[in-house]
Amino acid sequence: MNLIVAVDRSWGIGCNNTLLASIPGDMKYFKEHTMDKVVVMGRRTLESMPGRRGLPKRVNYVLTSNTDFEAERCIVVHTEDELFEALSRYDTDDVFLIGGATIYNKYYKLCDKLYVTKMDADLGADTFITDFDADPDFEIVSESEPITENGVTYRFVIYENVNKHKKPDPSV
Ligand SMILES: NC(=O)c1ccc[n+]([C@@H]2O[C@H](COP(=O)([O-])OP(=O)(O)OC[C@H]3O[C@@H](n4cnc5c(N)ncnc54)[C@H](OP(=O)(O)O)[C@@H]3O)[C@@H](O)[C@H]2O)c1
């Protein structure tokens, strides 16, 4: 399983249930990674999307406790167990957590790779995620050159879960 997110300098990801910045290069990157894949989001993230619809050409899973909730192009699930049971049908490399903070913070430890667009700015967020740099289970394996668009400088950073791939110590 993977995660894809754009963060500001403080690991902020959103404000008033919208994104912090509109960066065409990041939208393209997001599309390239998630197209034809399985995306998983919380109900608030779905509601922040245009038309309150799932993303086209992707299998969209939405988590909510509301059993009456329906949304176009979405498979609605109501518990963590129901979600992971459903996700077990897919190749884990094809699954992407796409937000928001409740989903990222609860499940990032289960991910193999974290695709993080780091925006070098303070963008006034009201919603934050864990600082992945402070988690020893994750290591940066690639970092792009800085790119500036719409007045925001950002880098594409990829983290790998080093804990998940650790072999058991035979001496223990
Ligand atoms: N920068 C980025 O890359 C990025 C990406 C995505 C989102 N965002 C931003 O993140 C913000 C939204 O994040 P958020 O944390 O407020 O909301 P969220 O994670 O999108 O959605 C939270 C909702 O998901 C449901 N949920 C979560 N865990 C559940 C579980 N175990 N069982 C059942 N339902 C569960 C609940 O819905 P119910 O209340 O209906 O039960 C909960 O209120 C927005 O500002 C958005 O723009 C940023």
Image (spheres, rainbow, N blue to C red):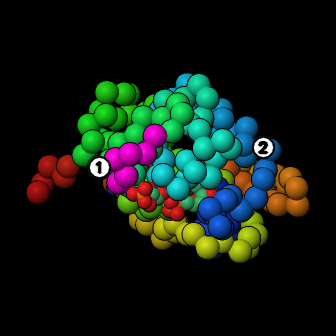
Q: Which residue is mark 1?
A: 79
Q: Is residue 107 magenta?
A: no
Residue pictured at 86% horizontal, 53% vertical: 149
Task: Tell me the kind of residue under disc 2.
Answer: Gly
**Is the stretch drawn in magenta largely helix, strand or loop?**
loop
Residue furthest out toward the left: 172
Which quadrant: the C terminus?
Answer: bottom left
The disc, 2 or 1, on the residue closer to the chain's N-terminal end is: 2
Residue on which disc 2 sits: 25
Question: Residue 87, how many percent across, how many down?
Answer: 34, 35
**In the picture, which quadrant includes the N terminus?**
top left
Judge from the rendering whether residue 23 lies leftward or rightward of residue 12; answer left or right: right
Q: Residue at x 43, y 66 (%)?
A: 135
Q: Residue at x 59, y 38 (%)?
A: 53
**Residue range (magenta):** 65-70
Image height of 105 relative to 165, above or below: below
Nearest the camera: 100 or 72? 72
